Image (spheres, grey):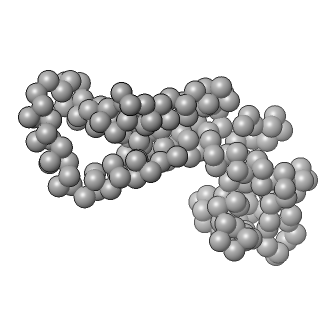
Amino acid sequence: MDRPSSLSPALEDYLEAISAVSEGDGVARVRDIAKRLSVRQSSVTAALRSLSEKGLVNYSPYEVITLTDEGEKIARSVRRRHRIIRDFLTNILLIDDATAEANACRMEHTMDKDVLRRLSRFAEFVRESPRTGDDWLLRFRYYFDHDGRLVSDDKAFAQWLDDLEDQPEIASEAASSEDAP
């Protein structure tokens, strides 16, 4: 999961983008990668040349781009790191999707392998432990929503839960966090 020393975070982002773009078709094009990363096509071309020299992509001008086996391995690793961090930020720390996504993009390149592993294990523990799980996460959400006040009144907590269920976007977040890996 550690980044190869010769690969910059920007090049990792290109591998991640190529992987995501080509997920459906099996290939990617310069314009698709540029659009996904919000960069100019000339920037994509320069990155592809560098990735091709490193043996991570199959690239020829005006042709489709595919990842080599090694490029796919690195892209999967980057996407996995990204997903773990984003899911932790949204499902455990209750950070909104856009903020979590932006921060996960930055953190995926710098987080040590052991820190990422512990972060992932902690999230798993919170979801799976009989003394934590969904109830614990809901109580944290209450704590967060009430400026650091712990649940002291079960009636107030029950009313807050009822109010939460009336908010479709919150209810769908809660359901998706239950399905998170």
Any part of residue 70 in sight: yes
Say which of 97 and 36 sits in front.
97
How far across and how far down the image is residue 152, in percent?
14, 24
How far across and how far down the image is residue 30, in percent?
72, 68
How far across and how far down the image is residue 116, in percent?
60, 31
Q: Residue at x 67, y 45 (%)?
A: 78
Any part of residue 50 in sight: no
Q: Residue at x 87, y 69 (%)?
A: 60
* 139 sits left or right of 3 in the view: left
How far across and how far down the image is residue 110, in percent?
64, 32
Q: Residue furthest left?
A: 155
Assign the N terminus to one quadrant of the image.
Answer: top right
Up the image or down, 23 lies above or below 128; here it is below
Q: Residue furthest front?
A: 130
* 93 sits left or right of 18 in the view: left
Say which of 170 and 29 sits in front.
170
Q: Residue at x 76, y 47 (%)?
A: 74
Up the image or down, 174 lies above or below 2; here it is below
Q: Residue at x 79, y 41 (%)?
A: 7
Q: Residue 135: which quarter of the image?
A: top left
Instruction: Count how many numbered circles sit on residues in the image.
Output: 0
* 5 sits left or right of 162 in the view: right
Up the image or down, 72 lies above or below 7; here it is below
